[in-house]
Image (spheres, rainbow, N blue to C red):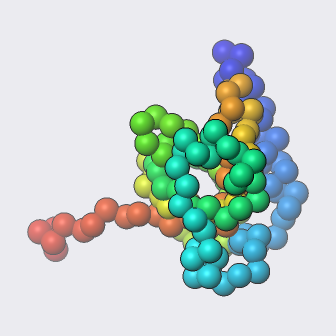
Amino acid sequence: MKKIVSMILCTAALLFSLAACGGEGGSASNLPEAEYKAACKAVTYDTLWRYPELHQDKMITMSGTLTEVTEKGTNYVLRVDVGDGQQIYVTYNRPTNKPRLKQNDSVVLYGKGMGLSGEAAGESVPQIEAGYIEIELPEEDDAKE
């Protein structure tokens, strides 16, 4: 119970701090979207967790499935399963021209490493500040047409 209350309070604090940044959504970078994504380097969970200082403020990309989505306007706090039950914590200020996110979405994250977050239920997990998130939509079944 204590972990749940702690997580709720920390999520609320993160949403408040994201909301304080304001704006109409969008990337923290001035790079065009394609250049921003191209500048991101793929990183594994293990490397990000073991050496967070090497990825601090570095542009990285990871993919996974949203396991928790907290939304306030265009500001999001996300937990993402990147495989084998390994979780990362993601903050995101969604551009208004991008789709909303929901639990179980498969996504590709593009953003900056933010070290480890001790705010996710008392455990240290890697944190990313996403500039862009792509939703990987399942392929349409041609038989449904």
Tell me what residue is drawn at x 67 percent, y 43 percent: 51
Furthest toward the right, the residue is: 20
Question: Is residue 77 something one can see in this rendering?
Answer: no
Image quadrant where residue 21 sits: bottom right
Q: How many marks?
A: 0
Along the line of sight, the residue nearer the viewer: 60 or 30: 60
Question: Is residue 48 something one can see in this rendering?
Answer: yes
Tell me what residue is drawn at x 62 percent, y 61 percent: 60
Image quadrant where residue 142 sits: bottom left
* x and y percentages locating residue 145 in the rendered image: 16, 74
Tell me what residue is drawn at x 77 percent, y 70 percent: 28
User: From the viewer's perspective, is residue 59 above or below residue 114?
Assistant: below
Along the line of sight, the residue nearer the viewer: 69 or 106: 106
User: From the viewer's perspective, is residue 19 above or below residue 117?
Assistant: below
Residue 24 relative to residue 125: left or right:
right
Image quadrant where residue 4 sits: top right
* x and y percentages locating residue 133 in the rendered image: 56, 64
Along the line of sight, the residue nearer the viewer: 116 or 52: 52
* x and y percentages locating residue 29 in the rendered image: 75, 74
* x and y percentages locating residue 140 in the rendered image: 25, 68
Tell me what residue is drawn at x 62 percent, y 82 percent: 35
Image quadrant holding the N terminus, namely top right
Furthest toward the left, the residue is: 143
Along the line of sight, the residue nearer the viewer: 93 or 86: 86
